[in-house]
Amino acid sequence: MGAVAGIIIAIFIGRLLYGSIKVPTVVLVCAVKLALLTFTAAVVQATEVPAAEVMRVIALVLIWAPTIVLRWIIVPLRMPRLAYWTVRICWPLGLVKEIRAGGVIYGALAIAQNDAPGAAIRWLEQKLHHAQPSRGAGVVATGLLAALRKEDNLARCLFAMAERMDRRLISPSVRAIARDWLVVDAARVGNWQKVIRLGRRGSDSMRWSCSMAHIGERLTGDPEAWRNWQLWPCFLWAPRRRATYPLFRRALTVPVRRSVLPEAAPTVAELPLALGHLARALDGPCDGKALARSIDAVDRQLESMRGRIEERLKALGSRNDAGAVLTAFRQRLIDLVTPLIEDNPYLAREAQRGSIMEQAVWQVRRRLFGDVEARCKDYRERTDERSALDPVAEWEAWAQLHGSADQLLELDPNVESALFQTVFAPVCNFAAFQHNGRKRIALAHDMFIWLLRYSRSDPQARQLLARNVQAGIAAI
Amino acid sequence: MTKRPLYVGIDLGTTNSTVAVFDGEEVTLIRNSMGGVLTPSVVRIDARGNVTVGARARRFLDADPANTRSEFKRLMGTTHQLEFPASGTFRQPEELSAEVLKSLRQDVADQLGIAPERAVVSVPALFELHQTAAASNAALRAGFERVELIQEPVASAIAAGWTQGGSNGPWLVYDLGGGTFDVSLLETREGLLRVVGHDGDNFLGGRDFDRALMDLALAKLAANGIVIDRANPRHAQALRQLRLAAEEAKIELTRAAEAPIFIANLDVDGQSVDVDLIITRSEYETAIGPLVDRSLGICMRLLATHGLGEGALERVVLVGGPTVTPLLRERVRAVLGADFGEGLDPMTLVAQGAALFAGTVALDGRPAAQAPASTGPRVWLQFPAMTSDLSPYVVGKVLEQSDTIKQIKITRSDGEWQSEPTPCEADGTFTVMVRLLPRQNTTFEMQGLDGSGRTVSLQPASFSITHGITLGDPPLSRSVGVALANDRVHVYFNRGSPLPIRRVFVLHTVETVHPGTEGHVLKVPIVQGEFVWAHLCRLVGTLEIPSTELTAPLPVGSEVELMLELDRGGQLRAQARIPAIDRIFDRVALLMTPQISLEALADALKKLRTRAADLSRAAFQDRSGKTAARLSAAISSLDEAEQNIKAAHGGDLDACEQARRALSDFDALLAEIEAEQAWPELGRKIEQTFAMALSWVAGYGNDVERSALTDTYQACKRAFVARDADEAGRQLAVIEQLGLAAYFRHPDAWKWEFDRWAARVGESTDLRRATELVAKGREAIRQRDFATVERIVNELWRLAPVDHNEQKLGHGSGLRMR
Amino acid sequence: MTMHDPLADWRSNPFFVLEIATDATPTEVERAGQRLLGLLAIGSASAGIYQTPLGPATRDADRVRQALATLRDPEQRVLHELWANVVPADGQASSHADTAPWKEAEHALGWSGLWAR
């Protein structure tokens, strides 16, 4: 074993000195770990330390599977600095290419239980800043720090971006953290559709999100939902069983429906009742159809109130007619619905849209496009000035543009062409600047891949982007 | 008097100022050292630096005009420096107003033995933020510790409402002062006085009546061969004397059918002339007729805005010296169709109302030390000082020995009413409904009861409430908002919003701000006005976030939580919090109106005439009669502005402000017309672009592109119908791109592009490089190397000039909405 | 079902804030407002929270003043009367109980420090 280790170390040294032997970093790390393990075992044996077996096991775990120690011991102990340094020293294989960012991830998870002390967050931010994050682990670390600072929207954008990142840029275990956060984020507000969508994209390494997706299907009465005898093994196979058990029990009690039960439209004869249904649709977990129906019911009742409104106006001494009041009412309705659609753009797609909903969607769309255009303008200017921010800020900026654009597409897939035309030139040029000028290969690559996904309407642009993506793959 | 409250109200007028006090029962006007209740708003500074205010100073308006200033109220909030050459000093209008206020404060001290520390000061309703700020500052300079502002029509309304009793319905306050005209529509309902709306004109007042009379006199003098020119600085002295004489004639004409204007030895161009004219009342009424009509037009506009026609008003209250003019009273009665409020002195109504208002907000002017002492556990009381409700609530909290005091009992001082013992809550709070005596001040005694029902004295032992009117919060006269980088205004407070008011919105930065870059500032411009476009609104203040205060770059899209707050008098407070760097900025550079140069005004006038001419031409070509009519009706305001600019050359500062205001309004009108004309233009562009794209995509596009083109065109039309310019623009960009993509598949397309740009090589930003490229391009075409031609065309595009004008228009704003 | 409370604006209806009926007279409106302003000024704990048909909400002096100003305008008052007359819908259908949010999610996974309250 010592001989094997010695050969591997020799290769490593040869690579360093001559640079001509290309060995993947993971292999080198494994070689070093093997050598360390061998060395430790030898030392333990030679010194005849009591409980030598225990020490060998500890060394084995720390060297080969430090994430077990991190997840089960250090993170629950809420020791961010210890978590960080454990990662730095023990080099978990999943974080080999971004070891510092990986340290920040586990440091952040260590203080995620409660409101984190500002000093700890600042320490981790400093470490991340020195790490100059360049890949998926850096993005997830940035997202966790944003979440610790209570910047939920920014965190959401970063995790969503990490969750869809090219597999070459992010390890499965890090992607799982991003996805798990998004799943929790959706589940805590009852957005089960999003939980299902996230979980369906999962793989074996994301057993928990897959399990949550099946639970979500059962809760929402999806015709494809699994029966109890299928759910049990899925649940038992997934981690965090104790934490998820109450939810799982809830899902088990929901009967499996093989067809979608049409929700009866509320029959309301009067405005107060229609408003009551609307309040319920807004506040509880709802779908776009129920929301649209309740809005239409309120809208229909309004005209019948015209006479009563005019009587009231007269009694209060106003000389105006009911028109202004009805217009103001409808505008308030639009303003009530707009934030809901902005937070859950898919609601707009599910609904059969009446005029109120249509105007609310239009308002959201205008805002999102405005945001995208402003950010593109900033990219254009910074490309011209050859000015770049530090890596953390660049990932944040890209995540936010990415987030607004994805929200737009979720709101209305038909805007794809218009959106692509808006973002293509500034983002592509900026990505080229980052790639060529600043050597931020991963960031540029993520931008090119994202653009390529939505370039169907422009074959010329598509060709250019495909070439850039290939260049990025070669450089990674 | 010392035991009763001292509520002080001051009318800071353009021509005269007045101070009144209210003691909870009656309003008293304070006399000045000359025995009058009206103190002329005139300040004189002599060679020794002594300041004289009022009638004594007014005497020198003629004899020593250079060192005697009047009518500076209209210049409040500007940076004009008024010179006093005898003492070699300069003063801002705010400082002169402070002298007037100091004099009035002294008058109160002389008459009542107390120099008040708090007061309410009136301002015109249409004063802008920087003008109200100047008024506040003037009061603080005058020695007041705290001042609240009240809009003049509201003050008049309070005084009229107090006097007229409890009639219901809408009524109007017509306030024509020396320099400003305010009209307010009010409503009284069950004792609640509400200001429904405001309108007015900051440049219409008695002074304009004087000027009309002067113009009449000047015309008569010119007919007699004596030419006095307003634009000639050498005639300024003669004009001043003439104006004083005209003022006296004006007063005479309210009682007589004619009035003489006689000035002996008037110096005109070095010659001494005698002025001896007779002005008849009918000539005067003809001259001021248009001014009166202008004021009535504003009244009718206000009524129409609120759905009121002729005859809908219960009554009209006239305020201000010029309202004694017989023609004015006749016309107001005829047009508005309502009787005048009786028993109201138009000269002092505003001051009385200001004093009453001080009572409603319990702004006692007495120094704090003079508050009467009493014994027993302290109670913190909250109750309205004045209310129309005969059964208001008194709310309180026992601050000391709260575990001993179990109940509160309140007894009316006349013994006719007493409350049931009201238990205190666990935290010592209690609420008791009391009964007032109608239309008077009612005093109550308050006692505590312990657990065994024994009486405990409390501190204060008594309090009083006046039954009168309840005043709704005064409304904001002009909308206030923040200018965004796209030259739009994000409105924080709509016109008519009640004051005080506070709003917070989250905005986002439009560009990355790097730290430490000297001179690089994130600007948050605060504007006032009703226009959609920020550059047309008045910039009233800018909150600046200098980059030197940043420790890290502030990326684009960073959140800025911006809070704006207006107090009851319209004083602005702003605060910006940037969560990304966890810093708060609250230094608002409140703008005085910058002194605009006459050359700049003249230049602006010329540009506006050119723009108007272009728009007229376009309207004529489009056969848009309505637009052409609007433009031609508005052109007269440009002529008036030109006259004012000429008068400003002669030293008339007021005329300069009027000209600036007229040009700004005309600019807004043109912007509105341009926006209307742009819409059909956009429609034409959409059709043309679609036709171009369709022809290319049909020949050189694929099925996906053809389908996308149809869908995009539909989306573009929908946006156009919905008048969403941004969305229409986006879809148009897609149509253009689809067309271009197909176009460039034509084998000769790059060659055509090259020829087009080669012809425009003179416009390039780098002429030398562009010329080199053109030469290489021609060579490449000869060799049929179209790949090289394509590369060269791309480079030529990069050398084309760019337009950066948009951000400049939004007052340099660095913010947008999300 | 959203990151922000969709009913927050509705709960600020002036009639809810002042805790008065929609047929209150102008005097009753002013009286209620004046009483609340007094209680808030003296720091009464109970004055800061009020109940609505859509759940509890908080108020401060600014909100009370805005409510008073709104109800003084006839058009605004009629508008808010319409919104205030809401009859809450019957208790949640069983399907809504199924798809209710999983409020303990962040605590259960030990990540409660990762979201703004």
Image (cartoon, coloured by chain):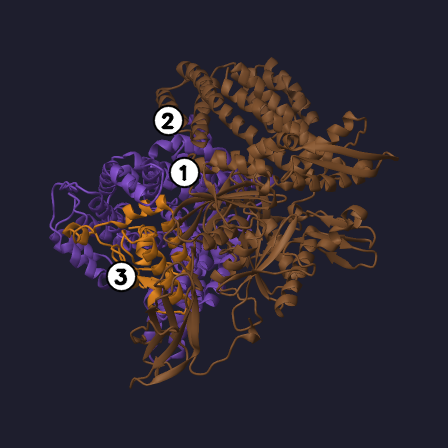
Separation of marks 1 and 2 at Cα, in angstroms: 44 Å
Q: Which amino acid does label 2 sit on?
A: Arg
Between residue B578 and residue B171, name the one nearer to us. Answer: B171
On the question of residue A187 being in view, the answer is yes
Q: Can marks 1 and 2 be said to lie on one chain?
A: yes
**Residue carrying label 1:** B312
At 51% from the left and 39% from the top, the residue drawn is B530
In this rendering, position of residue B526 left or right of residue B270: left
On the question of residue A27 being in view, the answer is no
Of all chains in the rendering, the one displayed in brown is B
Q: Which amino acid does label 1 sit on?
A: Ala
Separation of marks 3 and 1 at Cα, in angstroms: 62 Å
Crowding at mark 3 (Cα within 10 Å: few <14, some 14-19, many 20+): some
Q: Is residue B365 above or below residue B343?
A: below
Q: What residue type is labelled 3?
A: Glu
Separation of marks 3 and 2 at Cα, in angstroms: 45 Å
**Residue carrying label 3:** C104
**Display colour for chain A:** purple
Quadrant for the C terminus of chain B, please.
top left
Secondary structure beneath dot 1 equals loop
Quadrant for the N terminus of chain B, please.
bottom right
Residue B313 in percent (x, y) is at: 43, 40
Residue A232 in percent (x, y) is at: 15, 56
What chain letter is assigned to the residue under label 1? B
